[in-house]
Amino acid sequence: MKTYLIQLICWGSLLTVLSACPSKDPEVMGAIIETAIPNGLVPGSALTLKGRDFGTVQSVAFANTTVAVGSFIRTAVDEVTLKVPIGTQAGNVQVVGEKGPGQPKTMALLTGYSGITADNVSTNVTTVTQSSFSDECSPNFMLYCYKGACVGYLRDNRTTSIAQCVNQKFYTTETIGGSQYEVYKPYQASHQQVILKYQKQSTGSGYTGLVLMQTPDGNIYAGSVLKDGNLAGYSLNDGSALKLCKPNPFVAPNSKSNLCAGGNSCSTCQ
């Protein structure tokens, strides 16, 4: 009986000690990246990260650099879109929030020779115009194919010796993530209303190559000017791809009355 009482006292003392110990909270994981669009890193182009437990995002950390939230292209619940900095290396990517760095996702550089890849994007574009025509004050323009139809954009009328020719701009500007964008709408109302937004270089008059494309249904695609002059991007909504290519053959129009006239064809544009 005495032995039994001693055992009860010992067990009671042990329970008292254990109950006095502070309980350990479950490990806080932070943000978890479930989907990356595209599924690889393309320095100079856009990246969309989707997942869960993002909370209040402060930055995205790559293997050798970090992008703060003030430079993001877009933020939504458990989703961010940003430009991958030039020189970013392959490795872990983490969404950093109020809980600290989230669960790392290992990402490689996306390479290849077609579409948006590290080998194929332009990261220093001097001009977005494709040509100009000699009358009506020599406007600069660009032509792209969308769903088999040609869409034309005017940039401006160059200043010339003709008095009535002033530097009239056919674009607006917009600030996104601290960067300036030139925003173009199709010159002809009859064209498919695809809006183009080209990111400007922070210094000088050129462009970074990053481009946003908004289709008539309101879908926004983030991508790049490719080295062949075409545009490619991925939908911020569902990750689907969009490519706007130059007409083939490419023929400069002779007036603003119809930018897509003169033999430009979208039937062979892929």
Image (cartoon, helix red, strand yellow):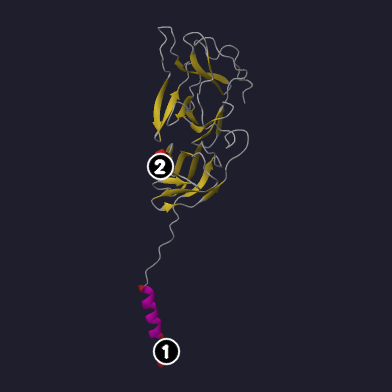
Q: Is residue 25 above or below residue 264?
A: below
Q: Amino acid at mark 2?
A: Val
Q: Which residue is mark 2?
A: 69
Q: Amino acid at mark 1?
A: Tyr
Q: Residue at x 42, y 91 (%)?
A: 3
Q: Is residue 21 visible?
A: yes
Quarter of image, res 228: top right
Q: Earlier in the sequence, mark 2 or mark 1?
A: 1
Residue 132 pos. (x, y %) = 52, 15
Residue 7 pos. (x, y %) = 42, 86
> Is residue 222 highlighted in magenta?
no
Residue 4 marker: 1
- Please identify the dominant SS of the magenta region: helix
Residue 25 marker: none
Q: Give SS at disc 2.
A: helix
For label 1, count other residues whose C-alpha is less than 10 Å away and answer few (under 14), some (14-19) or many (20+): few
Residue 199 pos. (x, y %) = 46, 30
Q: Is residue 168 above or below residue 47?
A: above
Q: Residue at x 36, y 77 (%)?
A: 16
Real-space Cα separation, disc 2 to disc 1, in angstroms: 65 Å
